[in-house]
């Protein structure tokens, strides 16, 4: 099951970061981000709603 539906999806994202604080000049930085599966996020939301009730 975990191989077909891994709990996390690894992905590279390009993020614009200011060269210096307050600088209008930005540089694109490639950051490695970890994302949960959409199905896991939905389960988390449903669990949170159930706990709130």
Image: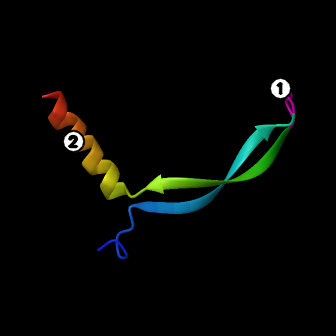
Give the residue displayed 54% in from the left and 62% down from the top: 10
Q: In the displayed structure, would residue 8 be above or below residue 17? A: below
Image: 30 above or below 19: below
Q: Which residue is mark 2?
A: 47
Residue drawn 58% across and 53% down? 33
Q: Is residue 36 left or right of residue 44?
A: right
Q: Residues within 10 Å of mark 2 (few under 14, many from 20)?
A: few
Residue holding disc 1: 21
Q: Secondary structure at mark 2?
A: helix
Check residue 52 in the rendering and tell me which mark sits there, or answer none.
Answer: none
Q: Secondary structure at mark 1?
A: loop
> In this rendering, which labeled residue sits more in front, label 1 or label 2?
2
Which image quarter holds the N terminus? bottom left
User: Residue 11: horizontal and vertical position, in percent?
Assistant: 57, 61
Please determine whether, in this image, residue 10 is positioned above or below residue 48. Answer: below
Q: Picture coordinates of residue 26 (x, y %)?
A: 83, 39
Chief SS of the magenta region: loop
Residue 33 is left or right of residue 18, and the answer is left
Report the front residue among 25 and 10.
Answer: 10
Residue extending farthest top: 22
Image-based side of 17 in relation to 31, left or right: right
Using a 10 Å C-alpha cutoff, classify the residue at mark 1 as few (fewer than 14 neighbours), some (14 to 19) or many (20 or more): few
CA distance for labels 1 and 2? 40 Å
* Colouring of the image: rainbow
Report whether 6 appears left or right of 9: left
Query: In the rendered structure, which segment of residues is drawn in magenta?
Result: 20-25
- Residue 40 lies in the magenta-colored region: no
């Amino acid at each position: 099951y975990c191989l077909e539906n891994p709990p996390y999806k690894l992905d590279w994202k390009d993020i614009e970061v200011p060269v210096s604080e307050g600088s209008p000049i930005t540089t694109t930085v490639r950051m490695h981000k970890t994302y949960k599966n959409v199905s896991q996020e939905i389960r988390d939301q449903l669990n949170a709603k159930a706990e709130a009730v």
